[in-house]
Image: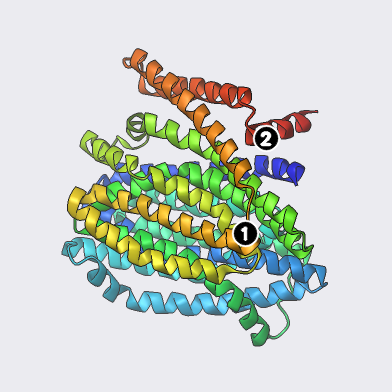
């Protein structure tokens, strides 16, 4: 397991980094052309609900299809099973696409009554365009899950990069002519190009039988597994939508600040959190298939410690550099220094959300592997009410700054509830091992933070990019040195894998 985790992580982290960089460039393009205006608010608000369905299909499909496809392959039914899921998903995605396009003119005024007439019109048409993407997204999601099942994680990421780059290219070409619509139309073109790319890789291999008539009972059986998993992902997006709706009442620019800060702060989660959780998923699936409970629990423990090792120093480092990073990435064009200051304040309050949700990614993979996704769904549904309550209380207290704070507090309760249920389900974890390693990692991060804060006082007058590079290099070296001296298990585990590959 260690060898496979180490090798796959290099490829997948590299591809994921490219994906997040391209996503960051997209946000930079939006900030450059639209700043924190009502146009940016309208575009970002319109993307929330379609994106809920997109993640419902992509992430939900991966979590549901990977273990069931691996099981079908062992029964020599993989080709037929993949074809049935592909065709069934196409039908479902088309229906969702049509329904979404029809109800978009009703949803936008209902969810964002404080938007101006111009903002509402932009948001409505942008939402319609995004809903038109759902049919292609459905087919893409099945093929991405197939790549993950074969541990070809980077192929899924490359196909997602195609979508983002298409949006960016469309904005550069047409933003001055058609505004925010250029990004949405570019996304639609990207989903089509991404599907063509996947079919080019899959069709010659003949790994999917699409000629047989749809076996609806078999498709229904799969979706009984998929539905709670997909809905759990959708619930997470509902919680994001709750925050965006509350931001819509906080005046022009609030939706934009929330979106930019969230995307930037959650980058370590997207790179490391999702990467580690995704890589261990097939390994957990094989442990469950082999009925090896000890190996399964060790995989979860290793995932939790490795996650904390790579995540905590990354997030703390970002927090110490947040004003520098937002100035570097966003402050140009229509994005002013006042918008930078507001976005920076919002970013600080997202810290807890990143840490807790990243750790929960590993726990959730354990649930999905055991086909217990319905348990997460029950917890997730409860988190919506909690999130609404926290947003109401904290937004009344702190304005739009209360929205990221609500997300962080809700993440703490959600992750705690998932961990309690999971531990009871698997018969316990080695908490002594986890606690000791977590303490060592935290001490290493504390040492790193002390050194970084001292250095920042000395280099205040240096160019912004030089400050960022200097702090990143020194902070990384200090953290690695202290983690090594403390003999942190997760750090030594990664170090052994690196040295083995070099050998």
**Colour option used:** rainbow
Q: Nearer the viewer, residue 435 or 110?
A: 435
Residue found 34% across the figure and 16% down from its top: 457
Q: Is residue 167 left or right of residue 444?
A: left
- Give the image location of residue 427, x and y in percent: 65, 60
Local SS, label 1: helix
Q: Which mark is residue 351?
A: none
Verify CB contact (< 8 Å) between mark 2 and mark 1: no
Which mark lies nearer to you, 2 or 1? 1
- Give the image location of residue 261, x and y in percent: 34, 44
- Give the image location of residue 246, x and y in percent: 25, 59
Residue found 46% across the figure and 66% down from its top: 379
Count of residue discs: 2
* Residue bearing the label numbered 1: 366
Q: Which mark is residue 494?
A: 2
Can the viewer see residue 244? no
Quadrant hosting residue 111: bottom left
Q: Residue furthest top?
A: 458
Quadrant hosting residue 330: top left
Q: Earlier in the sequence, mark 2 or mark 1?
A: 1
Quadrant of the image containing the C terminus: top right
- Position above or below: 443 against 158: above
Can the viewer see residue 307? yes
- Position above or below: 445 against 68: above
- Mark 1: few/some/many CA within 10 Å (<14, 14-19, 20+): many
- Mark 2: few/some/many CA within 10 Å (<14, 14-19, 20+): some
Question: Distance from label 2 to label 1 (Cα)?
Answer: 21 Å
Quadrant hosting residue 287: bottom right
Residue found 29% across the figure and 43% down from its top: 346
């Amino acid at each position: 397991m260690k060898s496979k985790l180490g090798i796959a992580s290099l490829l997948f982290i590299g591809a994921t980094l490219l994906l997040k960089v391209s996503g960051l460039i997209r946000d930079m393009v939006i900030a450059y052309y639209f700043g924190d205006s009502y146009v940016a608010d309208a575009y970002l608000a319109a993307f929330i609900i379609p994106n809920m369905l997109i993640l419902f299909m992509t992430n939900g499909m991966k979590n549901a299809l990977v273990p069931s496809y691996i099981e079908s392959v062992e029964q020599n039914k993989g080709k037929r099973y993949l074809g049935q899921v592909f065709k069934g998903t196409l039908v479902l995605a088309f229906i969702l696409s049509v329904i979404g396009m029809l109800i978009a003119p009703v949803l936008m005024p209902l969810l964002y009554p404080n938007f101006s007439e111009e903002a509402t019109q932009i948001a409505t048409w942008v939402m319609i365009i995004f809903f038109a993407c759902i049919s292609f997204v459905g087919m893409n999601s099945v093929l991405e899950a197939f790549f993950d099942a074969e541990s070809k994680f980077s192929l899924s990421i490359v196909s997602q990069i195609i979508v983002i780059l298409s949006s960016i290219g469309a904005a550069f070409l047409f933003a001055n002519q058609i505004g925010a619509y250029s990004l949405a139309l570019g996304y639609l073109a990207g989903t089509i190009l991404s599907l063509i790319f996947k079919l080019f890789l899959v069709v010659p291999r003949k790994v999917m039988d699409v000629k047989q008539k749809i076996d609806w009972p078999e498709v229904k059986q799969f979706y009984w597994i998929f539905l709670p998993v997909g809905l759990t992902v959708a619930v997470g997006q509902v919680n994001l939508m709750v925050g965006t709706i509350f931001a819509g009442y906080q005046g022009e620019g609030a939706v934009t600040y929330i979106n930019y800060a969230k995307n930037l702060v959650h980058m370590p989660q997207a790179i490391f959190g999702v990467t580690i959780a995704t890589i261990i998923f097939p390994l957990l699936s094989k442990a469950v298939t082999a009925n090896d409970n000890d190996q399964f629990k060790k995989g979860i423990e290793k995932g939790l410690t490795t996650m904390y090792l790579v995540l905590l120093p990354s997030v703390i480092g970002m927090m110490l550099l947040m004003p520098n990073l937002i100035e570097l990435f966003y402050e140009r064009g229509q994005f002013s220094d006042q918008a930078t200051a507001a976005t920076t304040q919002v970013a600080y309050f997202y810290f807890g959300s990143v840490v807790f949700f990243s750790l929960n990614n590993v726990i959730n993979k354990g649930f999905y592997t055991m086909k217990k996704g319905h348990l997460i769904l029950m917890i997730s549904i409860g988190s919506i009410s909690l999130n609404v309550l926290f947003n109401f209380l904290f937004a009344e207290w702190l304005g739009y700054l209360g929205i990221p704070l609500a997300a962080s507090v809700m993440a703490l309760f959600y992750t705690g509830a998932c961990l309690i249920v999971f531990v009871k389900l698997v018969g316990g974890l080695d908490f002594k091992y986890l606690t000791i390693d977590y303490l060592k990692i935290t001490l290493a991060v504390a040492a790193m933070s002390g050194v970084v804060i001292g250095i920042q006082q000395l280099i205040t007058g240096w160019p912004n990019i030089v400050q960022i590079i200097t702090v990143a290099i020194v902070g990384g070296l200090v953290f690695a040195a202290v983690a090594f001296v403390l003999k942190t298990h997760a750090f030594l585990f990664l170090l052994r894998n690196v040295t083995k590959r070099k050998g």
